Image (tube, helix red, strand yellow):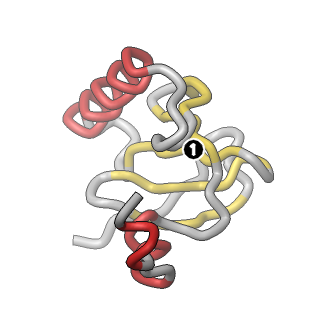
Amino acid sequence: MEIPFYFRDGVQEFLAIGGNSFIGLVDKTTICKYPQIADDESAIASLQVEATIFEAIGPHDRIIGFQGRLGNGLLLEYTPHGSLARYVSENPTTEQQRLK
């Protein structure tokens, strides 16, 4: 099944697609993660749980910055190096870093 892409309010550019979410650039410091299907209750519930977890944890140096909610979406810190998986694969940890 092909999912039609849509820009939600505030999104300027499409960046990526996840399991049930689109990732769009809001501005140079912020992305929005929002449901692929605007009225998908399961995807909306998952994003609400994710937001609740971000709010409970609060700011942390090793977790992407949570900047709030935008409708059914999450506003998150923009990471210019892409996904964590991509960054880790392109920037392997040195032995010295692993020993810290």
**Which quadrant of the figure has residue 1?**
bottom left
Tell me: 41 left or right of 79.
left
Picture quarter with the C terminus? bottom left
Point 48% across, 62% down: residue? 5
Looking at this rendering, what residue extends furthest in the right direction? 28
Residue 43, horizontal then vertical, whole percent: 27, 39
Q: As displayed, is residue 91 above or below residue 58?
A: below
Q: Residues within 10 Å of mark 1 (few under 14, many from 20)?
A: many
Residue 90, horizontal then vertical, whole percent: 48, 84
**Element carrying mark 1:** strand
Residue 21, horizontal then vertical, whole percent: 37, 52
User: Which residue is at the front of the view, 64 or 70?
Assistant: 64
Point 66% across, 39% down: residue? 9
Point 44% across, 72% down: residue? 96
| Number of numbered discs on residues | 1
Q: As displayed, is residue 74 above or below residue 87?
A: above
Q: As displayed, is residue 81 above or below residue 33?
A: below
Tell me: 50 left or right of 28.
left
Looking at this rendering, what residue extends furthest in the top direction? 56
Task: Write down the residue under mark 1.
Answer: 32
Q: Which amino acid does label 1 sit on?
A: Cys
**Which quadrant of the figure has residue 79?**
bottom right
Tell me: 99 left or right of 14.
left
Residue 56, horizontal then vertical, whole percent: 37, 15
